[in-house]
Image: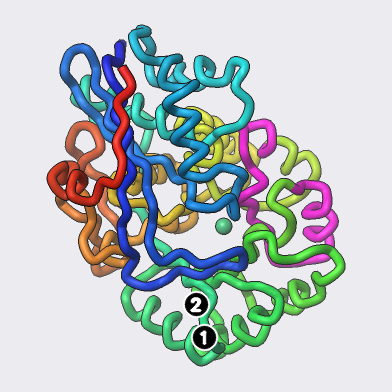
């Protein structure tokens, strides 16, 4: 049982090695909100809020999350006796949305519970995998040739899945160039981040001949009905990301036929309990799932790796090693990829990595303690 004494929020600014461009914007420095949760026993765990600087992925931003956590969410959990799996219902009552803010608190509680029980987080969640297959996500490049260079480097580096960000005007020609260079069996997929409508979906149908593992979230961020219409026209499986914000939305996806694969991001669905519930539902309905990424630091990565160790995560996750995005991560050891394209699931208690608190303090631009 956990009884939280304090939650300390910090905002850090972590420079990306290179700008990351998707259909809705570009990021060159990641503003990240970190939470340090302290139990009355003195035990500590860190978590991360995945909300971005602007509301271009979901309505949340780091600033709305900061407000939600300090004003509404932290008071719900501080001083109360709660077990990690039961946190989300506490945070849900009369607080609509703010799922990334809720997830940051909820995941921190899981991290704290694993630490206090002396168990690896993956084990607490029911994980069975010893290593996770790693995929890479490539931002929109300046030309098909530039994309080919990046795709070939990723495959040579051992990545088990290469995700190509697309948008109208940077889609079929780009993906075809990648497919031609990489060969028919290369594990390629595309992610549109909502850049299409049913009216400009012809280029998505043209992707059908390029043997993609899946096309991720081509239509609006909150849509299910039009995705169902599109899926009926495509052979390539649609994978939903932005649209799946809860177990109920995953159930709706299956009922409507809106997609055949789910990208689970714990930050998007309110945390780990909801992620596990979606995983369980998908597993019992023959829907493959995989763990997406939100340009997390090594702290957020720890939660994703633990989640992706569950048996239904049958496709490679966007759980790139630290060096993919950062000159230097804020955890030790940094996350590294094996020579066969996997990340090992930590066997040590809690998150399996230590937070470099000195480095975090040096990167901190604001701090607030809730008690
Ligand atoms: Mg996506």
Asked whether residue 66 is drawn in magenta, I would say: no
Q: For the point 35% across and 61% down, which residue is it?
A: 320
The secondary element bearing badge 2 is classed as loop
The structure's colour scheme is: rainbow
234 in magenta = yes
Rendered-image quadrant of the C terminus: top left
For the N terminus, which image quadrant? top left
Residue 186 image label: 2
Point out the stretch of residues depicted in magenta: 223-250
Q: Nearer the viewer, residue 302 or 19?
A: 19
Q: CA distance from mark 1 to mark 2?
A: 6 Å
Residue 240 drawn above or below residue 272:
below
Q: Secondary structure at mark 1?
A: loop
The residue lying toward the viewer, choosing from 51 and 189, is 51
Q: Please rate how many residues cluster around mark 2, counting C-alpha atoms within 10 Å: few if below 14, some from 14 to 19, many from 20.
A: many
Q: Residue 84: x percent and y percent?
A: 38, 20
Q: Residue furthest left?
A: 358
Residue 314 in sight: no
- Check contact, mark 1 vs mark 2: CB within 8 A: yes
Q: Nearer the viewer, residue 219 or 36?
A: 36
């Amino acid at each position: 049982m956990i009884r939280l004494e304090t939650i300390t929020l910090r905002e850090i600014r972590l420079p990306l090695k290179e700008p990351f461009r998707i259909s809705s914007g570009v990021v060159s420095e990641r503003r990240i909100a970190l939470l340090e949760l302290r139990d009355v026993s003195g035990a500590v765990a860190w978590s991360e809020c995945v909300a971005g600087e602007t509301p271009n992925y979901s309505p949340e931003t780091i600033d709305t999350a900061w407000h939600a956590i300090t004003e509404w969410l932290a008071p719900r959990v501080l001083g109360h006796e709660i077990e990690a799996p039961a946190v989300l219902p506490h945070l849900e009552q009369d607080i609509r949305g703010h799922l990334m803010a809720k997830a940051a608190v909820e995941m921190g509680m899981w991290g704290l519970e694993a630490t206090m029980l002396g168990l690896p987080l993956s084990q607490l969640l029911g994980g069975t995998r010893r290593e996770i297959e790693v995929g890479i996500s490539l931002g929109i490049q300046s030309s098909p040739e530039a994309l080919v260079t990046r795709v070939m480097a990723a495959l040579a580096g051992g990545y088990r899945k290469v995700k190509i960000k697309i948008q109208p005007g940077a889609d079929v020609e780009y993906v075809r160039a990648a497919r031609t260079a990489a060969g028919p069996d290369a594990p390629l997929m595309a992610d549109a981040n909502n850049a299409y409508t049913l009216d400009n979906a012809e280029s998505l149908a043209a992707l059908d001949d390029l043997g993609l593992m899946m096309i991720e979230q081509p239509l609006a961020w909150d849509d299910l009905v039009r995705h169902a219409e599109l899926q009926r026209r495509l052979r390539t499986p649609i994978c939903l990301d932005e649209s799946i914000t809860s177990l109920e939305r995953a159930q709706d996806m299956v009922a409507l036929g809106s997609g055949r694969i789910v990208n689970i991001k714990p930050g998007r669905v309110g945390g780990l309990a909801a992620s596990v519930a979606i995983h369980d539902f998908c597993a019992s309905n023959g829907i493959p799932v995989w763990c997406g990424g939100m340009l997390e630091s090594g702290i957020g990565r720890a939660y994703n790796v633990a989640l992706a160790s569950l048996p239904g995560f049958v496709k490679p996750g966007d759980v790139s090693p630290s060096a993919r995005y950062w000159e230097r991560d804020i955890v030790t050891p940094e996350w590294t990829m094996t020579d066969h394209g996997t990340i090992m699931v930590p066997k040590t208690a809690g998150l399996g990595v230590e937070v470099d608190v000195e480095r975090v303090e040096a990167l901190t631009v604001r701090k607030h303690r809730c008690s």
